[in-house]
Amino acid sequence: MNPISIKKELSSNSYPGRGIILGKSPSAKQAVIAYFIMGRSENSRNRFFETNDRGGIRTKAFDESKMTDPSLIIYNPVLTLGGKTIVTNGDQTDTIYDFMKDGHCYRHALLTREFEPDAPNYTPRISGVVKPNGDYVLSILKSNMGKPECLRFFFEYPAESGLGHFIHTYKCDGNPIPSFEGEPVPVLIETDDIDEWSSLIWENLNRDNKVSLFTSFINLENGEEQTRIINKNK
């Protein structure tokens, strides 16, 4: 499959759910990260991103009085450890962090986890890890065609200039919502400007369903990081 425009991929899907994009800038100087969340229910939409004290971000309720169930929507989407950046759509971020801290592989961590317990959707758990050299891995834990049996898929990519891979929780909107299918989608990364990258993603997410976006550019020579957070709830 040839790389496609992230603008086209996002704008043509009203509800990809939560999404991770990992890749490398056209100049080959920066690792590129994006993570976004969307929501259909009031509980899912009642969130925003803020920085945490562990080298990443956390989700937080925008209006605490409207939070009905924090179990699947309050977590650390991004954590850093030893020059590696962990990005996920749930509390498996901490599982991966703890396993890697003890010298284990992210795969070992995810073998202890399954999709989310939110029948009948069984929302997939998507995860990624960016290495200090820019290479990255992605994973999805999903139901077996809607049955409550966990299938685990792992993908490993060498970083290539101007190329990224996009994985998201849902194939599209629906009821129940169909899970993502196939391999992560190869997408073009056509800018070395984090603000241009952030705007491109945010502006092409569905206006009604988008909630928050985090982006990061990591300098592969010195490890310096630029980050941006865009929240619909301000």
Image (spheres, grey):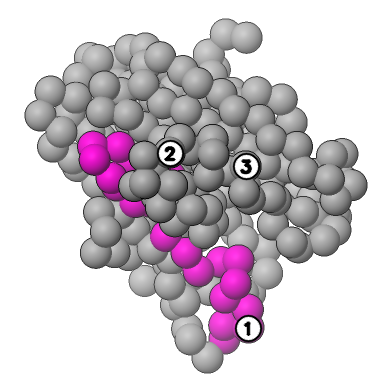
User: Which residue bears the numbered disc 1?
Assistant: 68
Q: Amino acid at mark 3?
A: Leu
Give SS at disc 3: loop
Which residue appears at 44% of the width and 56% of the height? 94
Which residue appears at 43% of the width and 72% of the height? 60
Q: Is residue 98 left or right of residue 216?
A: right
Tell me whether the residue at label 2 lies in contact with that at label 3, contact meaning CB atoms closer than 8 angstroms: no
Q: Amino acid at mark 2?
A: His
Q: Quadrant of residue 208?
A: bottom right
Taking 22 as reference, is 82 above or below it? below
Q: Is residue 224 visible?
A: yes
Residue 158 located within the stretch drawn in magenta: no
Q: Is residue 37 visible?
A: no
Which residue appears at 63% of the width and 78% of the height? 69
| 105 or 194, nearer to the observer | 105
Q: Which residues are magenta?
A: 66-87
